Image (cartoon, helix red, strand yellow):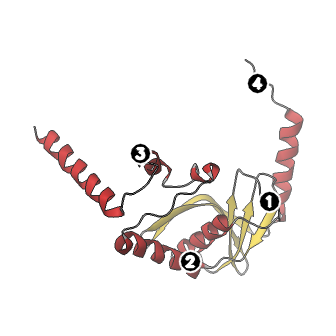
């Protein structure tokens, strides 16, 4: 089967993206900038240098929410990138921009402290709560979740605790080491 590419549609999408980029004042610092800080890591899609600091641009391939605000998880991602950037001499982060597949930029106010708070809560839950988070019933969200692969091998009825999973992984690693020794 041959795919027919609508060159007019591609040209119009490219024109929209160029217009959106031209509206951003400043100089593009880079794309896919990988940063690490305090156990957190990530790649900022686009980082802009402006007169009073930096702008983080996060690009998404999904639709924006119907209310034309950004999805909470995407705002948290910008917060996390702001935390990473400010810890790596890209400071201050003055603005975040989220671009969904409609190519209309949505401005957000980055809050690096929010990312640190959420990270600390997750670390605490994983280390001290011994309870796995509830499964999300929205399968579209699940496919984008970092725990998706783990959920595919866990029993659907649940009942496992975090320590059960840690012990199973430790046992599997010990078995692997024994096999490699022989």
Quarter of the image with the N terminus in it: top right
Give the residue at mark 1.
21
Q: Could you say which is closer to the camera, residue 18 or residue 146? A: 146
Whole-Å distance between the Cαs marked 2 and 1?
A: 23 Å
How dense is the environment of label 3, judged by Cα within 10 Å: few (below 14), some, or many (20 and up)? few
Whole-Å distance between the Cαs marked 3 and 1?
A: 42 Å
How dense is the environment of label 1, judged by Cα within 10 Å: few (below 14), some, or many (20 and up)? few
Q: Going from the N terminus, do you reach mark 2 or mark 3 first?
A: 2
Mark 2 touching mark 3, by CB under 8 A? Answer: no
Left or right of 40, for residue 26: right
Q: Report helix, strand or loop for mark 2.
A: helix
Q: Residue furthest top?
A: 1
Q: Residue visible at 76% across and 53% down? A: 63
Residue 156, horizontal then vertical, whole percent: 46, 49
Q: Residue visible at 55% across and 75% down? A: 115
Give the residue at mark 3.
153
Whole-Å distance between the Cαs marked 4 and 1?
A: 29 Å
Give the residue at mark 2.
86
Q: Going from the N terminus, do you reach mark 4 or mark 3 first?
A: 4
Q: Could you say which is closer to the camera, residue 79 or residue 153? A: 153
Q: Going from the N terminus, do you reach mark 2 or mark 1 first?
A: 1
Which label lies toward us, 3 or 1? 3
Q: Could you say which is closer to the camera, residue 134 or residue 98? A: 134
Quarter of the image with the C terminus in it: top left
Give the residue at mark 4.
3
Q: Going from the N terminus, do you reach mark 4 or mark 2 first?
A: 4
* Residue 48 higher or lower than 159, as above or below: below
* Residue 120 higher or lower than 138, as above or below: below
Residue 106, horizontal then vertical, whole percent: 78, 66
Q: Report helix, strand or loop for mark 4.
A: loop
Mark 2 touching mark 1, by CB under 8 A? Answer: no
């Amino acid at each position: 089967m041959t795919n027919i590419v609508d060159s007019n549609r591609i040209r119009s999408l490219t024109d929209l993206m160029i217009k959106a980029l031209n509206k951003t004042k400043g100089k593009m610092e880079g794309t896919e900038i990988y940063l690490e800080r305090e156990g957190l890591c990530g790649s900022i899609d686009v980082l802009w240098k402006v007169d009073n600091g930096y702008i983080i641009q996060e690009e998404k391939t999904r639709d924006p929410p119907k209310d034309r605000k950004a999805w909470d998880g995407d705002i948290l991602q910008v917060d996390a990138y702001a935390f990473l950037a400010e810890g790596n001499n890209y400071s201050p982060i003055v603005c975040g921009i989220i671009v969904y597949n409609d190519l209309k930029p949505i401005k957000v106010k980055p809050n690096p402290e929010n990312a640190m708070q959420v990270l600390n809560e997750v670390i605490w839950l994983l280390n001290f709560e011994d309870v796995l988070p509830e499964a999300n019933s929205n399968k579209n969200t699940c496919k984008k979740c970092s725990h998706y692969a783990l959920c595919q091998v866990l029993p659907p009825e649940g009942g496992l605790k975090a320590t059960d999973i840690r012990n199973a992984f430790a046992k599997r690693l010990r078995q692997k080491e024994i096999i490699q020794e022989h």
